[in-house]
Image (cartoon, coloured by chain):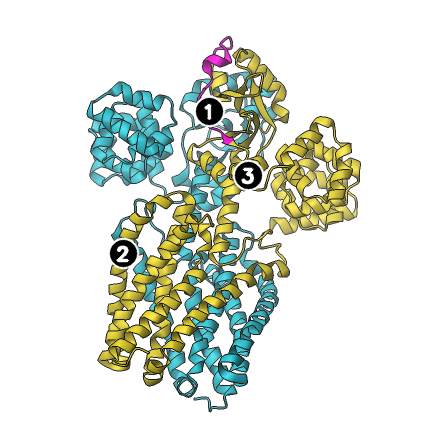
Chain colours: A cyan, B yellow
């Protein structure tokens, strides 16, 4: 609601080039909300609109825009304005934007930046996506161990405006090796004459530049940290990852896993902005791949065609049996995929959870068998009832154990366990269930096994 | 690895009642990691172990234990020790623990607490689960608007040891109404003689006690906040929700949604600790419910039994067609469930995304139709090829549109859209697909529609 209203107000003000009205809106609202409305404008208009803000406000709002929009707007900005914006942006956001620009734009932009900024952008933009290096900010505050608390606080006051956080600071030696950490809370509680080395914590948690963003976020969450220092291969401090970026990463990873659980390749855009072509591309691959899985079920049916022809009533129970196996398998897979993602369960726990699952699946199978026994009797007589009940117990157990094991198996061969999606499990379990069901049927109904 | 090793070391030290050895371990490790090993002990032993720590360390480690273990350990602690522990714990963790205790324990514990603590525990424990009230801490720092910055900093120094955070503080009037907020960064950058009222932000973001924890977390994430103040119905400040609790809530909600996406009712415990009986209970309900869905597919089959009997080759393609529809539906549902959960898409966007999906699903259907056309020809001749191709296009489109719409439909009637799980979508789409497929077949193969 608010967004639509703001969009209308801004459109009007922009048409009238009413700088004052636009600035007044931002005055009493958070930049993140202002950005939501700016995201609705086409790039050239958005660029014009942002140009009417003060440079710090411009940079602030810009940082909250959709990454794709940032790149589009940057494209329609004069080179010198873009350079000015760059120097106002936070280091990690700046590097992300840089990576979104075309090669030509990157080349055109770099000469316009101050040398230190240029090197910072180049370095931060060079780390692979989804690593600590790509996630980190280079705007962190450092102290030296021989400083007094008084001097440390003085320096922090000077540096505060340019740093992402001054609440957690890092103590380094002459080679930028990390020797300690100290919080602002501890600093202001300490006697100003004490040395930083006396009050700093020397056992510092850290991550490496190439560590996965998932692990970084999990560490920040597990230890309730504000920020986590990042070291390069030479053990030098090169950046910090902050809790707000960790939280974004957690949401991003959960979205990816949810998409994979539905057999969709991870999308590059959000669902409100994604294009038809991207949606098609990210879905068709799995759909076609799963066709070949379904052919296995078909092959099972072809193999037992004689049994089916002589007892067409068997077809009636196919969706029920095969479906139940797939459902039990999807349950087990969903539980395991998430447990592996959160670290509640690890690869080495496979046997343990498998043992538990045998009992749980046995219980589920017996219950489900009881449910379908009477259905089978009613619809096809005692023999069909026997087939259906026995098949149900086996199919539910087989489905559960396959669904539980698949994520571990994928993880074992270094694939993402989230790929053990419902559709994949369903397809595999369907084929297995079909063979179990028709195998039982041809055995019990006394026909020779073909 | 580390955990198992620590467990062994602690077991030994505990057997020898070696207090020094136990404290030495905690000395160079984070309480969160120490807690992981303590979680492995049986409650009475864990209680004994914790008893060998200093009280502040005890409270610190205790706060990181598994909630169920906290309750078990509390049960085996003498009443006065538990009361001492309570007064050292953080207010939000304390309230959560209180809610885990039995009625008798709660009654036994309360008289041992100081009056202020008793009221704080009672109040915080009274809010319903998963609301801002249940999530919040009452250990926040407040300032008055007429104070100077110097006085504000002095007060913060005094209060710092007992507050969850002093980095964001809240300015209240005599009736505890929230009138502003100010960060420690701003305070230490300001002239000590200025008034708090001059530098505080007066547009403060806040939540109500009864707001959902999902909304609280999303606000903290959207605005990159350290903490969010919580107001009661009389507009009084009663607590703060902090970023670390928000991050835990985000993970908890994602886990619940992942479980629901596999048709498992949300578990109360983590997967490494959950019991067989709980797993059975949380899964059997959906499995049985879905049986009735599968019966619809069975009914479809029964209705067209004549066609099947005369063309058994049709059965071969059943898993392929019905499965593909289910897969396309699962994809669409997974995308929408997550987009609704993150707020990328809202209820009012239904028609818009449905329009896009018609085109995407059309493309998917045509591609899939082309894939199976030759299969149909090869296996059953031109007529079967026609049936299979036409049915595939329709089934994939129908599956996608049902999968996309189900989460919206559930959301519309105030149910959790995450319940539109893969298995539910698959079951509904299977029945639809079966009728489409056999309907086409009986039409094209020239048999009278029964």
List the residue tagged with mark 2.
B358
Identify which residue, B438 or B361, lies in the foreground.
B438
Secondary structure character of the magenta stretch overall = loop
Q: Are marks 3 and 1 on the same chain?
A: yes
**Total residue callouts:** 3
Q: How many neighbours does mark 1 have within 10 angstroms: few (below 14), some (14-19), or many (20 or more)?
A: some
Residue B131's label in the rendered image is: 3
List the residue tagged with mark 1.
B204
Q: What's drawn in magenta, residue-wise?
A: B191-207
N-terminal of the two: label 1 or label 2?
Answer: 1
Q: How many neighbours does mark 2 have within 10 angstroms: few (below 14), some (14-19), or many (20 or more)?
A: some
The reply to whether discs 2 and 3 touch (Cβ–Cβ < 8 Å) is: no
The quadrant in which residue B390 appears is: bottom left
- Label 1 marks which chain's residue? B
- Label 3 marks which chain's residue? B
> Image point 36% across, 21% down: which residue?
A27
> Image point 73% across, 27% down: which residue?
B115
Identify which residue, A340 or B147, lies in the foreground.
B147
Element marked by disc 3: loop
Is residue A118 among what the camera can see? no
Is residue A5 among what the camera can see? yes
N-terminal of the two: label 2 or label 3?
Answer: 3
């Amino acid at each position: 609601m608010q967004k639509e209203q703001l969009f209308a107000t801004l459109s009007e003000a922009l048409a009238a080039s009413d700088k004052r009205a636009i600035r007044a809106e931002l005055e009493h609202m958070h930049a993140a909300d202002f950005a939501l409305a700016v995201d609705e404008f086409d790039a050239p208009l958005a660029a014009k609109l942002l140009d009417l803000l003060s440079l710090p406000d411009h940079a602030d709002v810009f940082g909250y825009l959709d990454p794709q929009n940032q790149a589009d707007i940057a494209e329609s900005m004069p080179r010198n304005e873009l350079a000015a914006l760059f120097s106002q942006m936070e280091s990690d956001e700046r590097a992300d934007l840089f990576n979104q620009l075309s090669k030509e734009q990157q080349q055109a932009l770099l000469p316009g930046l101050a040398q230190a900024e240029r090197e910072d952008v180049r370095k931060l933009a060079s780390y692979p996506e989804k690593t600590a290096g790509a996630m980190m900010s280079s705007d962190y505050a450092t102290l030296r161990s021989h400083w007094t608390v008084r001097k440390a606080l003085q320096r922090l006051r000077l540096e505060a405006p340019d740093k992402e956080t001054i609440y957690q600071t890092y103590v380094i030696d002459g080679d930028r090796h990390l020797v300690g950490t100290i919080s602002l809370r501890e600093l202001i509680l300490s006697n100003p004459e004490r040395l930083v080395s006396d009050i700093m914590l020397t056992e510092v948690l850290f991550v490496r530049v190439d560590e996965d963003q998932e692990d970084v976020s999990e560490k920040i969450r597990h230890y309730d940290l504000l920020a986590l220092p990042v070291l390069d291969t030479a053990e030098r401090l090169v950046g910090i990852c902050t809790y707000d970026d960790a939280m974004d990463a957690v949401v991003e990873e959960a979205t990816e896993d949810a998409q994979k659980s539905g057999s969709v390749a991870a999308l590059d855009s959000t669902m409100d902005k994604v294009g038809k072509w991207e949606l098609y591309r990210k879905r068709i691959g799995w759909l076609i791949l799963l066709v070949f899985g379904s052919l296995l079920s078909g092959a099972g049916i072809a193999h037992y065609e004689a049994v089916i022809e002589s007892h067409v009533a068997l077809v009636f129970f196919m969706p029920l049996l095969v479906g139940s196996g797939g459902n039990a398998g999807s349950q087990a897979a969903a539980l395991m995929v998430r447990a592996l993602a959160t670290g509640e369960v690890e690869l080495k726990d496979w046997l343990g959870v498998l043992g538990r699952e045998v009992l749980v699946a046995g219980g589920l199978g017996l219950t489900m068998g009881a449910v379908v026994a009477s259905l089978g009797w009613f619809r096809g007589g005692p023999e069909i009832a026997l087939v259906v009940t026995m098949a149900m117990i086996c199919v539910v157990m087989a489905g559960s154990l396959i669904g539980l094991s698949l994520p571990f198996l994928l993880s074992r061969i270094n694939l993402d366990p989230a790929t053990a999606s419902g559709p994949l499990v369903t397809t595999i379990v369907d084929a297995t269930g079909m063979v179990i069901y028709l195998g039982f049927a041809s055995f019990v109904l006394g026909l020779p096994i073909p």
